[in-house]
Amino acid sequence: MTPSLKYEGALRRRARQLRRLIAAGGHRAAWGAAVVPAYWWDGHPNFGDALTPWLLPRYGIVPVYREPRRARLAGVGSLLEFFSSDYDGAIWGTGLMTDVEQRMPSASVLALRGPLTAERIGAGEVPYGDPGLLVARHVRRPARRSAVVAVPHGHHRGHEGLAALLASEPGRARTVNVHQRAGAAVREIASGEAVLTTSLHGLITADAYGIPAVWTVLEPALTGGDFKFRDYEAAVTPGRTRYVDFGDLRTLDDVQRLVRSADAARVTALADGLERSLARLTDVIPALPRYPLGVLRRQPHEV
């Protein structure tokens, strides 16, 4: 396959961008909305990374993918290591991947994933929460389909121990493929009574719908270890964690016994803060073009 035809290649990225622009027009809030050069991870398909272009048109913002040096908005995900210390655009619900200090004094921080990221980048008091908490405001929870829904990180899809646990009682558990579009993955996760995850956005989606969840760690270890989980939980469940050692999950009964829900009132407060913070975007990034005028006139290699 030629480089341009790979998922991260120029042709396929342009095709995805065009589909997203067309899809944005299906949301009344996006008509005449601000068009924002934004960065999210687009190196492979993953529903959590796809939340930036999925969510923002619903709030009257149309993101257009740009590499970090050209972006004016950092979106959903563990992305801040990709930006330079002199970045002067906006940050909305973004986090660090690793436990490192990375001061960003010129950035306009609308919201951050959690207080650990805030401390590492030198931010003051700002709203916390991952924007994935907003999905339940746009997708109705489907009917229950499984007692346990497992959301393994892409690195863990072939984990033998996890596969054996889920297969121990046929029909009681199902696995969500994170390498799919945002809406489809959200609906699958929301159809469970309990969520077992090694993917952060599996936990976040569970919290958005008030579904009790537990997260664990499998091999291979994720880049940054558990920092992004601790950062998120410090915002949503301060002082406690839903982490359980995988060795303690011997049966599906163990999963259902050990899952815990985030406080619904706190989730609502964080989601409200994330929505309010978006209202400041056009103040901190002035003179943005409006959708659809000017969008498709971008240089092809930048779309």
Image (cartoon, rainbow, N blue to C red):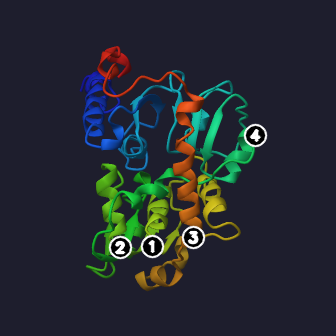
Position of residue 227 relative to residue 66, above or below, is below
Residue type indicated by callout 2: Gly
Q: Residues within 10 Å of mark 4 (few under 14, many from 20)?
A: some
Specify whether residue 110 is in view: yes
SS category of the residue bearing label 1 = loop
Q: Which mark is residue 211?
A: 1
Mark 3 in CB contact with mark 2 (< 8 angstroms): no
SS category of the residue bearing label 2 = strand
Give the side of residue 24 with respect to residue 263, left or right. left
Say which quarter of the image contains residue 19: top left
Spatial distance from mark 3 to mark 4, Cα to Cα? 28 Å
Q: Which residue is mark 2?
A: 192
Position of residue 300 relative to residue 166, above or below, is above
- Among the two numbered marks 3 and 1 on one chain, the one whose residue lies closer to the N terminus: 1
Spatial distance from mark 4 to mark 1, Cα to Cα? 33 Å
- Among the two numbered marks 2 and 4 on one chain, the one whose residue lies closer to the N terminus: 4
Spatial distance from mark 1 to mark 2, Cα to Cα? 8 Å
Q: Which residue is mark 4?
A: 122
- Comparing marks 2 and 4, which lies closer to the viewer? 4
Position of residue 42 relative to residue 68, above or below, is below
